[in-house]
Each structure stands twice: as structure tokens, then as C-alpha cells.
Amino acid sequence: MSSGVQPTQECLEKFQELKTGKKLSYVVYGLSEDKKSIVVLKTSEDKEFDTFVGELPEKECRWAVYDFEFTLPGGEGVRNKLVFVVWSPDDANVKNKMMFASSKDALRRRLEGIHIEIQATDFSEITKDAILEKALRR
């Protein structure tokens, strides 16, 4: 079921910047204050995974795209995969969680080129190892 909430043009532009320019390392998305659109809350060039995870609040839902860089086993080279993160912490307001869940597809469908999707309710579910495991399967 869709909430009718749609991403702003800036959401799509920042994703394209991340995808093609390789300047940005991540984009964090959320709902506008009036809950009528999906907006960009933060962009960063910082490649540190822990910094990215630190942007996810303990009690609020978010969506994010992270440019995950990893080395292939056996030293076969370095690769990048775009990771779509659905952050819905256990401690978030139930109404907020429902709104984010029903709005996810409106954003996800517009972001072409995502390789991996992670749904996390706790920080233990969004680790480098969890993403690397998915990246190596693709």
C-alpha cells in the first residue's frame, strides 16, 4: 500500500550525483515536516562507514543510499555497490514506521542502479560484514 508520498526532485538529483559523480559517499532521506514528500536530509563526501551509520538516529526512521567500496577476495580488485538502506529502528514511533514502510517504494523505484537493499531495525543489522556478504553474492 502506497502512502502517496513522493520524492522531491532534489532526492533524484542527489542520487544521480552519488551514482555518477562519485563525489558523494551517501545521501540520507526522510519525510518533510508536513509528511507530504520525501526530502534529502543530509549528503556527505565522507567515505567512513561508521560516520554514515552514525547519521541514522536511534528513534527515527530514514532511508539512505551508501556507496559501498570493497576489495574482492584474492585481491581481484576494488568494487563499488550502491546500497539502499531502510532504517526503521525498533524504538521508532509505530505511526512513523508505517509511514516509512508505505512510502519506501515511491523512493526506491526512482533510484535506478541500486545493487543491494538492507532493511535494519537495529545497528547490529547494518554492518560492513552484512553488506559485504550481500555484495559478494552479486
Image (cartoon, helix red, strand yellow):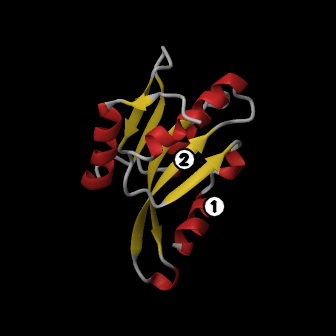
Q: Position of residue 122 (x, y in %)?
A: 71, 43
Circle 1 Cα neighbour tier, 10 Å, few/some/many (<14 / 14–19 / ≥20) = few
**Location of mark 1 (residue):** 130
Q: Determine if residue 93 is in view.
A: no
Judge from the rendering whether residue 109 lies leftward or rightward of residue 104; answer left or right. left
**Location of mark 2 (residue):** 85
Please say if 33 is above or below 8. above
Mark 2: which secondary structure?
Answer: strand
Please say if 3 is above or below 106. above
- Dot 2 and dot 1 residues touching (CB under 8 Å): no
Q: Position of residue 89 (x, y in %)?
A: 69, 36
Residue at the far top: name it.
Answer: 34
Q: Quadrant of the N terminus?
A: top right
Residue at the far right: name it.
Answer: 90
Judge from the rendering whether residue 44 lies leftward or rightward of residue 132; answer left or right. left
Judge from the rendering whether residue 8 lies leftward or rightward of residue 54; answer left or right. left
* Residue under the image location 66 percent in, 46 percent down: 120
* Residue under the image location 26 percent in, 54 percent down: 20
Q: Position of residue 95 (x, y in %)?
A: 68, 23
Residue at the far front: name it.
Answer: 1
Q: Amino acid at mark 1?
A: Ala
Quarter-of-image position of residue 14: top left
Mark 1: which secondary structure?
Answer: helix
Q: Position of residue 84 (x, y in %)?
A: 50, 50
